[in-house]
Amino acid sequence: MINSKQIQRPQMILVVDDQEINRDLLGDILEGKYALLYAENGKEALDLMREHRGELSLVLLDLMMPVMSGMEVLEKVREEEALSKIPVIVLTADKNAELKALQLGAADFITKPFDVREVILARVDRIIELSEGRQLISAAEHDQLTGLYTRNFFIEYANRLYRYHPGMHLDALVLNIEQFHSINALDGREFGDEILRVIGRAIRDFLEETQGIASRYDADRYVIYCRTEGSYRAILDRFQSEVNAFASNANVRLRMGVRPWHGDAEPILLFDQARAACNMVRGDYQNPLMVYDEDMRQQEMLRQRLLNDLQVAVEERQFKVYYQPKYNIQVDPPRLSSAEALVRWCHPDLGMISPKKFIPLFEGNGLISVVDDYVWREAAGQIARWKEKLGYRLPVSVNLSRADVFAPDLVEKLVGLIRDNGLEFRDLKLEVTESAYTDNAHRLLEVVARLRKLGFEIEMDDFGSGYSSLNMLSEMPIDVLKMDMKFVRNIEKSEKDYRLVELILDIAKYLNLEVVAEGVETEGQMTLLKDAGCDLVQGYYFSRPVPPEEFEKLIRKELEMERRSEK
């Protein structure tokens, strides 16, 4: 194996002095350890520095020279960013010139005439080591792709600004790219990287006009800590216009969350709140900006309260499972076919909490499996109780979330529920959403195939609410298609919507799938769906979700209808 030190090129030093004897003396001291370049005046020195700016580790610069003095060289070097990073040791016999040279950026000085060889070598070694250390730190401070600060350095810098400059009113901005993973997938990673660079450059330009710092915090998330004067929409529009100018043939959309300065809040809290605001406008192309305010703070406090109370809620059975019936409308009169289990939270302090408030929260935090598991157990037990008490078998649909799909014991857990409650596999229907498919199609298909082979019926929930519906239909083994309520909402008024429903029903019929229409609220909707060939409906037209004891009345009514039909 070749030792990397054996092939490493020596560090390069430029020796600048108009006296040949001085160049020779320094050459004798440094030769063997360093590669050397020589210049006789300041102009030659600048030309060599520009030519070898990526290679030079140090410049030894005489101050008194013809054509261009050492002081003039220092002034020129300070004006050019690429050259200013090269450390300079001045060579002088003028004690009065040392201070000015240091003020112009010199790293150190060596006094003429040169005497102690070891002292000169030690000074050179030390300055090169310090300079390379600073360059290494600087490289670690910046994201290579965008030139913005790295995450850790940004956090430390922001904390110091907050601690040592409390009078600086800096707002927290979080900028995200919508569906960045799709951009990478459709247009390629190189295009995605260039988008990131464009945004980074736009942020750097913006910060040149105001006080502040910024970082590419995650893959496609940027954080900016700066003065804004409250013109948040103008800032977002500025960044968006830069992206539009670069990606004129691609639809790349940005969204931004803002937490205005608050003297009592440390930067990390401000950015957590700005990120929460940014997440609230995910997918909202009409209103891609959200400013964190008191209402949002109250919502954040509520969400944290719900997260904290989840385990106790399960232990104390605060969650209540309601049931909404599904009716077969292809018979007259419509008959009860099955039900969907829907969870409610009866909180001891907060009262009845809508699932719209806690389901998305738990999905986002990976805790939805705790709620799902509770609902599965309650539903399986309720099916068994109705079967024993009323002699009536009622299949119930329960949700299978994205988090559930990844659980290694999912199949065993569901099979255990069927066995422990004396049920058949078809008694517990499993609803899967499109989002689970788009997240990890291979895993979902694998799990669904195992469950369906056992005898579970699989329902595709919210069909048409996402982007992959037709692809899902061609790949996933399902039994029932649940048509999203947005298709049903306007079918009485819109011929176009009604034709779309007919098309979905035709596709389902071709694939031998049963269809459930959700959100049916009027007799007109029900009649149109029946005429179009829809099998089942659920919605407020027949019943809202109700607790088990109230649902029992619907079962008894169904049993009475069966007895009458038998006479």
Image: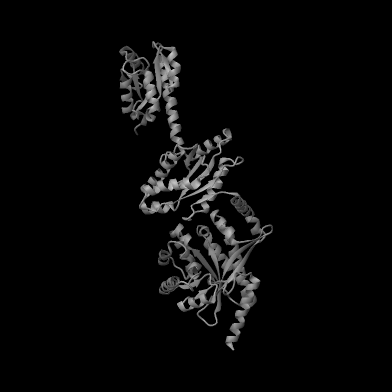
As drawn, 472 above or below 302: below
Observer-nearest of 414 and 342: 342
As drawn, 46 above or below 454: above
Res. 407 in view: no
For the point 47% across and 41% down, the residue is 215
For the point 46% across and 65% down, the residue is 464
What x and y, as percent, mark residue 445?
44, 62
Q: Quadrant of the C terminus?
A: bottom right
Furthest toward the bottom, the residue is 567
- How many marks can you see? 0
Coloration of the structure image: one colour
For the point 31% across and 28% down, the residue is 51
Q: Quadrant of residue 119?
A: top left
Q: Is 18 on the left-hand or right-hand side of 520?
A: left
Observer-nearest of 468 and 393: 468
What x and y, as percent, mark residue 405?
50, 59
What x and y, as percent, mark residue 389?
65, 75
What x and y, as percent, mark residue 366?
55, 54
Furthest toward the right, the residue is 348
Q: Quadrant of the N terminus?
A: top left
Res. 113 in view: yes
Observer-nearest of 519 and 217: 519
